[in-house]
Amino acid sequence: MRVYVVGGAVRDRLLGLPVQDHDWVVVGATPDEMLARGFRAVGKDFPVFLHPRTGEEYALARTERKSGRGYTGFTVHASPDVTLEEDLRRRDLTINAMAQDEDGTLIDPYGGRRDLENRVFRHVSEAFAEDPVRVLRVARFAARFEGFSVAGETLALMRTMVDDGEVDHLVAERVWQELARGLMETRPSRMFAVLRECCALARILPEVDRLFGVPQPPQHHPEVDTGIHVMAVVDHAAATAQPLAVRWACLLHDLGKADTPVHVLPHHYGHEAKSADRARAVSERLKAPLECRDLAVLLAREHGILHQARALRPVTIVKLLERTDALRRPERFGLLLEAAACDFHGRPGMAERAYTQAAIWYAALAAVRSVDAGAIARSCTDKASIPQRVHEARVAAVKARHAEEED
């Protein structure tokens, strides 16, 4: 029985990066032997065990054979006669198909170290094509490791997988998992660039793919292309360490611009409502968490008016605060403003400018929250008039705050 650390831990150690988790492969053992050593079985589809002391995962060496469509259609063979090289061969990329033994000796049968040095993502074998999740994984790795590129033969294989319809069999939960992880990397735009290059984005997120090539007014968007703008917005969200909900909202905020009639371009009058509808539909299709869906819908619907804070009348400001539920959910409203700031900064020359609109909205929210709705309700003899009276008091409070600022 031999034990090896494999995959990401080996890769990251060679890159000089912190190692977060260890994956272990056990060669020459049976499930009964693992149980006898105190390991606890947890794998359903193949033999995986938890170490009795560290809780880390130890998997028996195995091979996989394609038996159906999608990423679940595999027959797994795990036995003591499966070699380490056979186990490593079923992995996705050469940089993830390295192992180290207990003495620290590197086992690298497929040239992973060379590809690390050359900053290349290269598939280990043609078995790569058997699992469509690997298309998403390669794209996600591109978002994490900025200096890497996809080997030409690997990109060609990914395109073939898309053409063969393999990507169409991915379930929503798995797509969401990979997209969410990619959005949380340092350069999310690189993930979408790889997905576009292999034609997978049009299958996985056609609403985003359609944005590329859609023009915007150059006086407001010097980058012109809507897709390029959205990528810059998402990257700014990553650069400012925004949470997933903000990054997802940034990705979907302009989806309605792809529906603008050609004769109207480059203008996009009223695109916000269509963007909100599409943001909701995409989020629900991919089963995104509710906080991600709701923030995406809010940003898509409201980002245009949020940017106009200085020009808005107090009554318009109060209506927005009320319909976004900012009084009851100020934390979510804060995330909405963070996302709006990313949209503002996602244009050439704007990254270093202050998004002063946020201060205006926070001041207005403070003024509205200073209104004692309970006292107003108690003073009303006509209960039906309470909502209007409260609304009017809020408008008056925002007007007063504006007057103080002007003085």
Image (cartoon, rainbow, N blue to C red):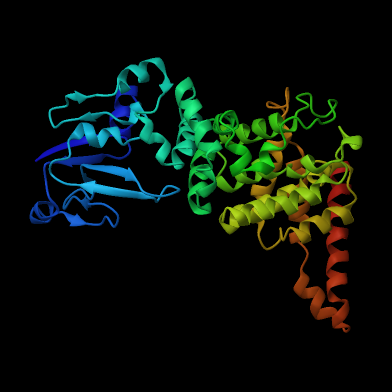
Residue 331 seen by the camera: no
Q: Is residue 279 left or right of residue 128?
A: right
Q: Measured from the top left, where is residue 203 in percent x and y? A: 60, 42
Q: Measured from the top left, where is residue 25 in percent x and y? A: 21, 40
Residue 155 seen by the camera: yes
The image quadrant where one finds the C terminus is top right
In this view, 206 is above or below 373: above
Quarter of the view holding residue 137: top left
The image quadrant where one finds the N terminus is top left
Q: Residue at x 21, y 52 (%)?
A: 49
Q: Measured from the top left, where is residue 301 in percent x and y? A: 77, 50
In this view, 316 is above or below 383: above
Q: Residue at x 89, y 56 (%)?
A: 315
Q: Residue at x 85, y 26 (%)?
A: 219
Q: Measured from the top left, where is residue 313 in percent x and y? A: 90, 50
Give the number of callouts.
0
- Comparing 76 with 401, the one in front is 76
- Comparing 179 with 296, the one in front is 179
Q: Is residue 302 left or right of residue 76?
A: right
Q: Is residue 362 left or right of residue 28?
A: right
